[in-house]
Image: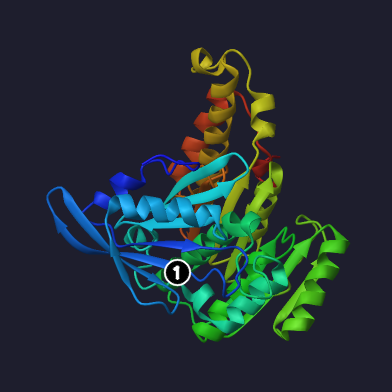
Amino acid sequence: MTGRYLFMGLSAQLERADFSRATLSGSSGSADAPDILITPLHRTPGEWTFRVVRGTQPPTVTDIEGVLALAQASFDGGYDTLACETADEIAHYTKTHKGVAMRVEPRADYQAQMWGAAAFNEDFILQSPEARRVLAELGVMSAQGVIRRKQRDKLIQIKNLTKAVYGGLRELDLKQVRAVDAACGKSYISFILYYYLHKELGYPVHFTGIDSNPRLIENSRAIQERLGYEHMAFHTSTLEAFEAGGAVDLLYSLHGCDTATDEAIALGVRTRAKMIIVVPCCHTEVRGQLGKNHPLRGVTRYGLFEDQFAALLTDAMRALALEAEGYKVATFRFVTPDVSTKNVLLRALYTGTPSKTARSEYDDLRKQFDVRPSIERLLGWQA
């Protein structure tokens, strides 16, 4: 099947035994472009048929060539996305000015056990009218309930961080959530977490957002007022200067640039937060400290590898520092690289038992590579 749009790999996905459904959606959100749902109807070797449902029209039956032709015609019309779902992944096809962009993300339910969130319902955001209202206030969704094209990756990040929080809360068996959003920015995560933890799960909550940009803090306060979310407070402050003034159950920081992630970790350790979640961004400090006389100079002599190694070394030392301070650390792939290349998530749960082994391993890395990350100073390790 040829045409203006190339749906790379779609035929193979439709032929998979675990194909469950494909959904064609339009960005207009109007009744003229209702979602088109394609589900498997009959499979025999070399023969596949599918049931097609378009809005309120009667269902029709077609084959693989018919599905490809439907996708072509739909992208020529008012449709711009096609999501094809199998047991372990979702392939997203998006209409662009150059043709079709394609990316694949793992299904959340397929990886639920790894995240420790087997009962997590990732569709809560789209199922709840109030959650959709929150997304509309944040600009992720239009007032008509359509996810904005440029915000789809943001929505994936929101859901995955919420999932990581949910899994940690189940493991810790917390009865309330006093949360700190370190370097909160536009507070996407905080507003969704407030809704999900308080309104969906029934936790007593209080959220504190911190950012050094007063304009962002005022914007978050305005959204809070419009939503009527009482148990929130936003403060203009640096992370180093902030005083929590009480116990912290959860501290998180999404894409804190370079040493901002270290500042968030240190704030979490300083407040003995029961759970710390960080998704680091940029690792320029350690890269700038790497010399030429270390054990892996044959790797870091190449610029791209030096970038990747500096990120790996930085985050490994952060994980060891957290363990040395009495946390149990797990690392996850936050999102797929096509959503964001900054896709490492560290989740630390407080145990109260500092690890001498982790501190020794940290010191070994520091000596081998002759680096002094800011986390040492921020944790008060340096004399």
Depth check: give the residue in front, 243 or 86.
86
Location of residue 178 with respect to 282 vertically, above or below: below
Q: Spot the residue most to the left.
A: 45
Q: Would residue 277 be found to the left or right of residue 215 on screen? A: left
What residue is shown at x 72% (from left), y 73% (from top)? 137
Quadrant location of the N terminus in the rendered image: top left
Residue 149 in view (yes/no): yes
Q: Would residue 378 be found to the left or right of residue 65 on screen? A: right
Depth check: give the residue in front, 77 or 144.
77
What residue is shown at x 55% (from left), y 41% (from top)? 99
Residue 370 x/y as whole percent? 61, 24
Residue 8 x/y as whole percent? 41, 40
What residue did someone put label 1 on? 122
Residue 351 in view (yes/no): no
Total marks in image: 1
Q: Spot the residue most to the right.
A: 214
What residue is shown at x 72% (from left), y 78% (from top)? 232
Residue 258 x/y as whole percent? 68, 41
Location of residue 169 with respect to 359 vertically, above or below: below
Q: Would residue 286 be found to the left or right of residue 45 on screen? A: right
